[in-house]
Image (cartoon, rainbow, N blue to C red):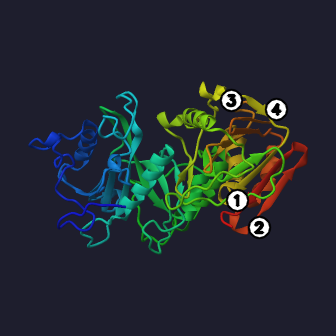
């Protein structure tokens, strides 16, 4: 990651210079004006921090549109005093600039107009508890923000409020238990309309493994201002033992808002022999090629499918994304948050193919959410989707109450291109949930393990993350 070094402001920091002031148009005299999209975001920040007009910034040495590796042009770092009355500690507030369309001239993002989302429609923020005596903000949150943004740019997937990122290592590379992230709406910055479209400020919240699982199984991110404290040694379960019971009751009575996760997943009509996927750690490693047993598609079909999934499976991006899972830095997919499967014009390009039987193979981390999918989603009449991180396919579990599906009791298994739907009737759901219940405790699962329901012609194999 390339950073411009500030003078007297610490490594990787630039202080006292608003972006745009060092740019000269056509060799003329004087600075270029600040782009309208960027100025609108700055104006929102100034409304919160009127006394910090020139905050410390991390800035990309070579801008992305000039071939640089980092999508975010700037990350501002503000000192926030918190609110003792609300038990909100003093903290550093990080704000990104670059996921949305800052320039409005097509150099990075397609021009869409003020009535649509600007660029990807969001910017990232994070609040990190300020340690006693700390004079300047740590820069590791900026590296996290750049890493997440790289995936967004490379995959064209979105990070939305309610998403979960299972990172599997301390966010600051220390010994901290805070090793994962949730996405919430920034409680102060909220959303803003710019000349280039609307922008939502999505806040990264550091959580422990136990808290991540709680969020996956029930709703939301909660907590005033959602300040990340890397030094806390206890999870919410240990601080508030009643939370575990509350989560269980919430799943049973209200269901889960988690509508999908990313997964290493493949499917075939006949049982697969041996598929050995390993969950990628993006942006740390590149994706592997799709397994041979997965449906093969041409380049033209791939582009059509990509459009289908973006407009259909991910249509919530323009409406508010609902809750989704992001594994190893990989955002998952979701369908209409109201429980209706979206079909689009581009989806009609694919012929619906009926399948007599289905064999799914899925990695353990994603497979461990199958009990939640059945108990917290399908039992409550809601779908659940596993979005492949290997290719652009998806597998959706569908209960009878979901409208718009291309499967039903008479045709329980069908595909359109790489999108497979599996119909789970109400009388089969309790048996399937009971058989898969042990997956909820992945540490106790012996891999690979296979579940078969011969009378339903359905097989599910759960495999290890790495072999």
Labels 4 & 3 near each other (Cβ < 8 A): no
Where is residue 50? Give x, y as percent. 19, 48
Q: Secondary structure at mark 2?
A: loop
Q: Residue at x 67, y 54 (%)?
A: 369
Q: Using the rendered view, name the quadrant where residue 205 is placed.
A: bottom left
The quadrant of the picture occupied by the N terminus is bottom left
Name the N-terminal-most of marks 4 and 3.
Answer: 3
Residue topped by disc 2: 446
Q: Of tags 4 and 3, which is closer to the observer?
A: 3
Q: CA distance from mark 3 to mark 1?
A: 35 Å
- Whether residue 398 appears in this view of the structure is no
Q: Of tags 2 and 1, which is closer to the observer?
A: 2
Q: Residue at x 33, y 61 (%)?
A: 2
Residue topped by disc 3: 350
Is 356 on the left-hand or right-hand side of 299?
A: right
Q: Residue at x 39, y 61 (%)?
A: 143
Q: CA distance from mark 2 to mark 1?
A: 13 Å
Q: Residues within 10 Å of mark 2 (few under 14, many from 20)?
A: few
Q: Of tags 1 and 4, which is closer to the observer?
A: 4
Residue topped by disc 1: 440
Residue topped by disc 4: 411
Q: Secondary structure at mark 3?
A: loop
């Amino acid at each position: 990651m390339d950073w411009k070094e500030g003078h007297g402001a610490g490594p990787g920091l630039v202080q006292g210079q608003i972006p745009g002031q060092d740019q000269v148009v056509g060799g003329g005299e004087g600075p270029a004006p600040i782009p309208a999209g960027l100025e609108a975001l700055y104006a929102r920040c100034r409304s919160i921090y009127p006394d910090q007009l020139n905050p410390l910034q991390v800035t990309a040495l070579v801008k992305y549109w000039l071939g640089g590796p980092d999508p975010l042009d700037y990350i501002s770092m503000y000192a926030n005093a918190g609110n003792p009355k609300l038990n909100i500690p003093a903290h550093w507030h990080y704000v990104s600039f670059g996921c949305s369309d800052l320039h409005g001239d097509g150099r990075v993002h397609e021009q869409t107009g003020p009535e649509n989302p600007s660029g990807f429609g969001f910017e990232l923020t994070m609040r990190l508890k300020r340690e006693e005596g700390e004079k300047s903000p740590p820069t590791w949150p900026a590296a996290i923000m750049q890493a997440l943004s790289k995936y967004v740019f490379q995959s064209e997937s979105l990070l939305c409020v309610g998403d979960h990122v299972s990172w599997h290592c301390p966010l600051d590379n220390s010994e901290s238990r805070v090793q994962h992230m949730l996405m919430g709406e920034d409680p102060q910055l909220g959303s803003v309309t710019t000349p280039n479209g609307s922008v939502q400020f999505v806040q990264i919240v550091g959580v422990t493994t136990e808290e991540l699982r709680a969020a996956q199984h029930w709703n939301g991110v909660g907590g005033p201002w959602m300040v990340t404290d890397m030094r806390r040694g206890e999870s919410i379960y240990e601080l508030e033992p009643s939370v575990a019971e509350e989560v269980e009751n919430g799943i049973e009575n209200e269901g889960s808002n988690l509508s999908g996760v990313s997964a290493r997943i493949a499917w075939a009509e006949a049982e697969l022999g041996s598929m050995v996927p390993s969950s990628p750690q993006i942006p740390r490693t590149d994706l592997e090629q799709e397994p041979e047993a997965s449906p093969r598609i041409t380049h033209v079909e791939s582009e059509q499918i990509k459009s289908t999934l973006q407009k259909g499976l991910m249509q919530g991006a323009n409406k508010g994304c609902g809750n989704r899972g992001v594994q190893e830095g990989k955002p998952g997919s979701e369908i209409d948050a109201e429980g209706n499967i979206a079909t689009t014009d581009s989806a009609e390009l694919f012929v619906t193919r009926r399948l007599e039987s289905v064999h799914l193979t899925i990695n353990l981390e994603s497979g461990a959410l199958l009990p939640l999918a059945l108990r917290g989603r399908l039992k409550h009449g809601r779908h659940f989707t596993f979005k492949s991180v290997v290719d652009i396919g998806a597998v959706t579990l569908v209960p009878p109450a979901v409208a718009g599906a291309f499967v039903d009791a008479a045709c329980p298994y069908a595909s359109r291109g790489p999108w497979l739907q599996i119909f789970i009737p109400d009388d089969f759901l309790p048996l399937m949930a009971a058989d898969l219940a042990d997956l909820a405790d992945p540490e106790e699962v012996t891999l690979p393990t296979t579940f078969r329901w011969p009378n339903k012609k359905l097989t599910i194999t759960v495999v290890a993350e790495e072999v």
